[in-house]
Amino acid sequence: MEAIELKVDMLSIHEKRLRKCLSKVKGVEKIEVDGSIQKVVVTGYAQRSKVLRALRRVGLRAELWSPHNEILSAYASASLMINNFSFF
């Protein structure tokens, strides 16, 4: 069994469409979605190319997750915390 980590540009309204799309791909057993960092983990015996193709077919921008994405998401969450902090 393999876990495929993806970065998917989505809003919360896209999660239902994403799950429905991926559940139809042969070999997908489990789908985990973390909307805050736009990360999707697909577990099963599905091929990466078929998973990416299915997402792109329904209009979602997707790419394989990389360590670069981890750094960007950490930076974005830190900058949001700093911007939300206000001085009196």
Image (spheres, grey):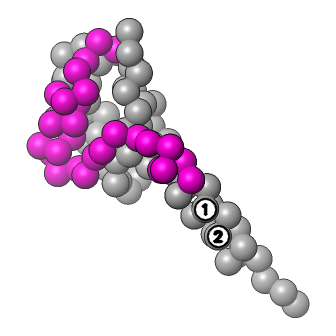
Q: Residue at x 64, y 70 (%)?
A: 79
Q: Is residue 64 magenta?
A: yes
Looking at the image, which residue sits at the far right?
A: 88
Task: Specify start and end residues of the magenta stretch as a single range.
Answer: 44-71
- Residue 85: image tag: none
Question: Residue 79 bears which disc, if any?
Answer: 2
Farthest top residue?
1
Quadrant hosting residue 81: bottom right
Question: Which element type, helix, strand or loop, lies under badge 2?
Answer: helix
Residue 37 spot, x, y in % from top left: 51, 50
- C-alpha separation, residue under disc 1 versus residue under disc 2: 6 Å
Q: Are marks 1 and 2 in contact (CB under 8 Å)?
A: yes
Whether residue 15 appears in this view of the structure is no
Q: Is residue 66 part of the magenta span, yes or no?
A: yes
Left or right placement of residue 25 versus residue 77 in this view: left
Classify 10 Å Cα crowding around label 1: few (below 14), some (14-19), many (20 and above).
few
**Amino acid type, mark 2:** Ser
Q: Nearer the viewer, residue 48 or 84?
A: 48
Q: Residues within 10 Å of mark 2 (few under 14, many from 20)?
A: few
